[in-house]
């Protein structure tokens, strides 16, 4: 078993993961601005498309990251806002041909942040879209993926590795949400269990 992460190390991982998830679209906006400055109107339609798509992705992802990893705010008590913010985030991961759909059912704010982080973790395993369900039942939260989804075996292996108290050898920042989920639940004196049958998911209780 690996040494547990310090708060500083966890913060570094989260910052690295968030930066990785937004840098591509930041670069696209920068390139579009450069084209505008050059004044070549032949690319105007392309520039508009780049700016619209990139700003939409950046806005959706940053709003999601703010709620999932930022300081507590009133939005974590608004289940409609949680659902909309999470759905918009998932749209930035899926595509028109391979969308990621969400069914979210929360009854109390206690699992609000954990549900968002768990959804992010499972969304990382999806290769060609799919459906994620997150439901609070009694004193438990179950977040699962539909059985028909195509999944990344490598990411599943590394998620299980982190949950067992170890660290992936490569690209550890990719799994910052898993480390963070463990920390969140530990503060609530709760545990998270990874399940693979009858379908892939995370059970928090």
Image (cartoon, rainbow, N blue to C red):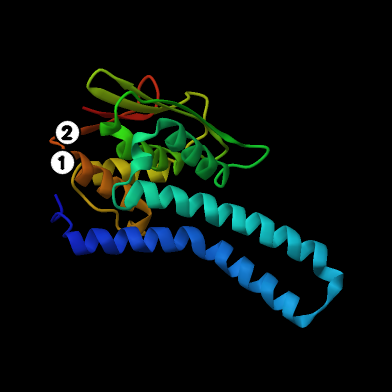
* Point 56% across, 66% down: residue: 26
Residue annotated with mark 1: 186
In the picture shown, does residue 65 fall above or below 76?
A: below
Q: Are marks 2 and 1 in contact (CB under 8 Å)?
A: yes
* Point 73% across, 80% down: residue: 37
* Residue 156 in view, yes or no: no
In the picture shown, does residue 188 fall above or below 17?
A: above
Asked whether 21 or 155 is in front, the reply is 21
Q: Secondary structure at mark 1?
A: helix
Task: Name the residue at the right extreme.
Answer: 42
* Residue 22 in view, yes or no: yes
Q: Position of residue 5 (x, y in %)?
A: 18, 57
* Point 30% across, 38% down: residue: 114
Q: Position of residue 11 (x, y in %)?
A: 26, 61
Q: Position of residue 205 (x, y in %)?
A: 21, 27
Asked whether 155 or 75 is in front, the reply is 75
Residue annotated with mark 2: 190
Return the mark for residue 100. none
Task: Name the residue at the bottom extreme.
Answer: 38
Q: Is residue 100 left or right of residue 1?
A: right
């Amino acid at each position: 078993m690996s040494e547990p992460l310090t708060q500083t190390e966890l913060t570094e991982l989260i910052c690295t993961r968030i930066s990785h998830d937004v840098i591509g679209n930041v670069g696209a906006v920068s390139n579009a601005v450069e084209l505008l400055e050059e004044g070549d109107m032949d690319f105007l339609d392309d520039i508009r498309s780049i700016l619209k798509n990139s700003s939409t992705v950046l806005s959706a992802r940053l709003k999601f990251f703010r709620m999932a990893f930022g300081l507590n705010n009133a939005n974590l008590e608004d289940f409609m806002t949680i659902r909309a913010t999470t759905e918009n985030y998932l749209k930035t991961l899926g595509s028109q041909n391979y969308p990621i759909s969400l069914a979210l059912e929360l009854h109390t704010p206690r699992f609000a942040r954990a549900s968002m982080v768990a959804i992010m973790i499972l969304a990382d395993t999806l290769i060609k879209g799919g459906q994620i369900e997150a439901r609070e039942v009694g004193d438990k939260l179950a977040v699962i993926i539909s059985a028909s989804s195509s999944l990344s075996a490598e990411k599943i292996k590394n998620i299980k590795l982190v949950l067992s108290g170890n660290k992936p050898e490569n690209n550890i920042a990719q799994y910052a949400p898993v480390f963070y989920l463990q920390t969140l639940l530990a503060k609530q004196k709760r545990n998270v269990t990874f399940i693979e049958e009858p379908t892939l998911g995370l059970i928090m209780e």
